[in-house]
Image (cartoon, rainbow, N blue to C red):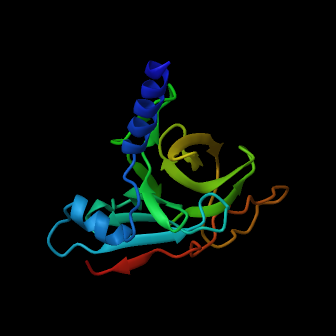
Amino acid sequence: MKAKYCLVVVIFLGSRLMYSQDIVDPVADFSAKYEGKSGDKIYRLVCDLENNGKPDIFLAYSSSLESDGDCGWVLYLNRNGKYITAPGLTEHGGTDSTLGITFNIKRYKIGNIAELDKWGLLTSETSTGVNNGTQLKAIIVEGNTFKMVDVGSYQLYTGPTPTPSPGSTPVPSRFPNPPVPAIEELNP
């Protein structure tokens, strides 16, 4: 009987150690754990990623921004006023703290993602060549982990509404311009 209780305690403690717990200041935690380049700024996106009324926080260094607008992020989930860093959920159901989050800082929205019937962050990756178009991706939270999900491929545009050719109907962008909520730039 004692062996069962020990096993439960070990599993419980092991699962709590998988996540960085009880972080009060995500920016200070991010700065301490991740080293930026000289002159780097910290990008911060505060949003309600889980639609629970609690602000979750994405953080990234400006040097991780790529020319196409993609940026690598660390996600801090709000758990009753304190934060945890969320590892990624693998396709096999395990977790991996090295899985990174990328999304385009020019094209994203927080809200319900109709194709998944889930709340999260919707972003896009533009492809060129034969399959010229936009791949939609979603970042959704499952428990204390995040998951990146392919939503679909679409022909989208983000600029001003073009004049439609006769007999066609333009497809409006799914991304507000500029994105809301806005990404803040902080000095570390």
> Which residue lies at the image location 52% right of the left edge and 76% below the top edge?
182
Image coordinates for residue 166, horizontal then vertical, percent: 82, 59
Above or below — where is 145 with respect to 91?
below
Q: Which of 88 and 70 is in front in this view?
A: 88
Residue 105 visible to the viewer: no
Residue 4 visible to the viewer: yes
Answer left or right for 21 relative to 172. left
Q: Nearer the viewer, residue 78 or 92?
A: 78
Locate residue 95: give its quadrant: top left
> Which residue lies at the image location 35% right of the left edge and 64% below the top edge?
60
Image coordinates for residue 147, horizontal then vertical, percent: 53, 42
Farthest bottom residue in view? 187
Farthest left residue in view? 38
Q: Quadrant of the C terminus?
A: bottom left
Farthest front residue in view? 1
Image coordinates for residue 138, horizontal then vertical, percent: 58, 48
Above or below — where is 43 with respect to 69?
below
Q: Which of 162 and 108 is in front in this view?
A: 108
Answer left or right for 180 relative to 22. right
Answer left or right for 56 relative to 39. right
> Which residue lies at the image location 54% right of the left edge and 44% below the top edge?
132
Image coordinates for residue 83, horizontal then vertical, percent: 45, 62
* Badge count: 0
